[in-house]
Amino acid sequence: MGYRASAAAAALAVVAAFALLAVGTGSARGVPGSVHVLLRPGLVTLGGRVTMRVDGWYRSRLEVALGGATDRNGRLLGWRAARRRGRTWVAELPRPALRGIYPVLLREQPGGPVTRSPGLLLRVFRPHASQEPGFATPEQVVRWWVHTWPRGGLAALRRWRRPDFDKRDRRLHRLFVVAYNPPGQPGVPNRLGMFVTTVRDGYTGRWRLLEATVQP
């Protein structure tokens, strides 16, 4: 994941990063009780293949999408048609270019109402990330990362504006910039920086480490 930044890049990141931005909000609609959706698997690593099975969708067509999922150029992956197999619909979900949690969206046709549920989410995580601890706030996640991975001392922590190409749900993803000192290397000249992305494991879940990178 590139946990170590060069001193120059880290210094630039830390100096430029101490500006706070607001986080947007959105709304969700419930999936009708007669509709049953199964993701196989519901948690994958980046680039992993996920198939979806939908039962109880008694309409002429079904299209599926992942809310906020983009390709490497920041373009939304859009909708794709599901295939009907008897009374069941089957589709392969898009493969986002970014890790995160993505709402699964359903609709009958272009321009039609979108059906979604707060509990219907695809998780795209690092290997073994789901086995790491969860926290009540995203700031606690960042502090845990500093003490656990680089095993450093936290010097500064600020929220950072996410890039325009990042379309992921802002209620579920938070980006921070941190400054820290490596073990046994106190003082500003030894200070390093990193961008840490946290993810909420569901709209009412706990916060986890998504990834740490040199660039946001």
Image: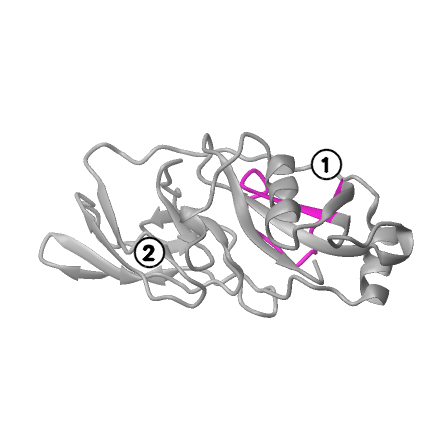
Kindly tell me whether residue 35 is visible in this rendering.
Answer: yes
Residue at the farthest front position: 184
**Quadrant position of residue 9:** bottom right
Q: Main secondary structure of the magenta part?
A: loop
Image quarter where the N terminus lies is: bottom right
User: In the image, which residues are magenta?
Assistant: 158-177
Location of residue 127 in the rendering, given as x and y in whole percent from the top left corner: 43, 59
Tag 1 secondary structure: loop
The kind of residue tagged 2 is Glu
| Among numbered discs 1 and 2, the one appearing first in the sequence | 1
Location of residue 65 in the rendering, given as x and y in whole percent from the top left corner: 40, 55
What residue sits right under mark 1 in the picture?
22
Front-most of residues 129 and 18: 129
The kind of residue tagged 1 is Ala
Q: CA distance from mark 1 to mark 2?
A: 33 Å
* Colour setting: one colour
What residue sits right under mark 2 in the picture?
63
The magenta stretch spans residue 87: no
Residue 195 against residue 5 in the figure, above or below:
above
Location of residue 203 in the rendering, given as x and y in whole percent from the top left corner: 47, 34
